[in-house]
Amino acid sequence: AKAPVASVKYLQSEKPGAITSWLGASIKNIETPGEQSASGLPDKNGVLILRVARGSLPDKSGLQAGDVIRSMEQKPIANTGEMLRVLQLSSWKDKIPATIIRNQQEKKLIIFLK
């Protein structure tokens, strides 16, 4: 059995409205019906990208503000805590596959981690 990993980052990401920094991008959980419908999501699962710094790894991966990350490494991503856990487990890799929703369309991307 794997030991649970708890860190301050995960605790912060569970607060409503909390914005988490990730490699030069600002991300948050989908929390309101407005965020859900604006993204064209069937549910509130996913991580909303609020801002992407030019030249950052998320930018080089092709992520844009308004994108919603729905899966990484073929694992569904419901919230920022789950996303950070998948990223931590994949941190030894150079890149991982992800599925996003952009303009209400599903797209596949490769996320660069290094």
Image (cartoon, grey):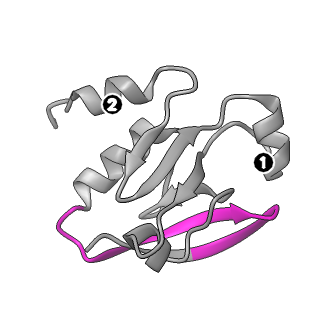
Is 92 situated left or right of 69 in this image?
left
Q: Could you tell me residue 48's position as x and y percent?
A: 61, 48
Position of 48 compared to 83: left or right? right
Task: Please indicate, yes or no, whether residue 33 appears anywhere in the rendered image.
Answer: yes
Identify the residue position indicated by label 1 in the image: 41
User: In this image, 25 relative to 108: left or right?
Assistant: left
Q: Nearer the viewer, residue 46 or 76?
A: 46
At 42% from the left edge and 30% from the top edge, which residue is drawn?
Answer: 13
Q: Percent position (x, y) of residue 101? A: 70, 61
Q: Can see residue 78? A: no
Point out which mark residue 10 bears.
2
Horizontal and vertical percent position of residue 94 = 26, 77
Q: Quadrant of the N terminus?
A: top left
Query: Relative to 11, is 49 above or below?
Result: below
Question: Image height check: is 35 above or below 109?
Answer: above
Q: What segment is highlighted magenta in the picture?
A: 91-108
Give the SS element for disc 2: helix
